[in-house]
Image (spheres, grey):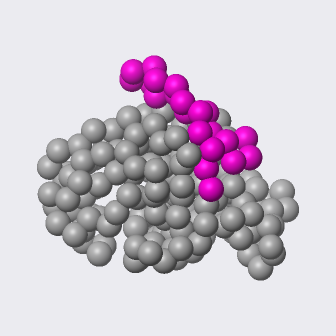
Amino acid sequence: MRLTLLRFFSKRPLALVALAAVGAIGVAAGAAHLALGGPDEGSQESSAADNPRKILGRGWFDSWPEKRRDTLRLYFFGGGGIGIYDEGSSYRYAVDVFELERQGDKLDISFLQDGKKTETRFTITPCDEKPPFDLCLDLADSPRGPKRYYGFDDDEDYALIEPFAQGWIKDARARAR
């Protein structure tokens, strides 16, 4: 599984750089949230359905690629108001960078290349319909691709997708205490 992602990003260096930059912003925002007294892991507020902030700082995939030619769609919504949308395979892909504003369960998205703007509502629910994912993101009006994307609720599961994220998460938690 890790090898597939390493191959995926080795052929998409710009996607990796963009994801790393946006990820760093998301982790920093998460650390600030924890430092300011964010919800406990065991609290009801931290459940996926009750916390629209779970959309931020994690990758949302339409599927898990099995082969290098499998097409993948990926959203990353950064906590700093910037996100990326990536679509393609290891051999051919396109990356769109967008500005976003999240208010509760509503997103305002503005793609920087073509100027397309959209507003959509979203819901995040626990689900296990597509392993290895355990969260579902449903977009009411998806600006690109399907209306349902999948992600990871657990930071350790997320670190399997982005091996460099594990160190960032650990450092952010240490600074937040």
160 is higher (above) or lower (below) than 61: below
Residue 111 x, y percent position in the rendering: 46, 28
Res 175 seen here: no
State the residue at coordinates (38%, 58%): 62
For residue 10, side relative to residue 174 (left or right): left
Residue 38 inside the magenta-drawn segment: no
Residue 17 x, y percent position in the rendering: 37, 45
Res 151 seen here: yes
Between 142 and 58, the one lying in front of the other is 142
Residue 37 x, y percent position in the rendering: 85, 62
Between 172 and 9, the one lying in front of the other is 9
168 is higher (above) or lower (below) than 126: above
104 is higher (above) or lower (below) than 163: above
State the residue at coordinates (61%, 60%): 124
For residue 167, side relative to residue 96 (left or right): right
Residues in magenta, as a range:
103-123
Quadrant occupied by the C terminus: bottom right
Q: Which residue lies furthest to the right in this view?
A: 37
Quadrant occupied by the N terminus: bottom left
Residue 40 x, y percent position in the rendering: 79, 73
Residue 106 inside the magenta-drawn segment: yes
159 is higher (above) or lower (below) than 19: below
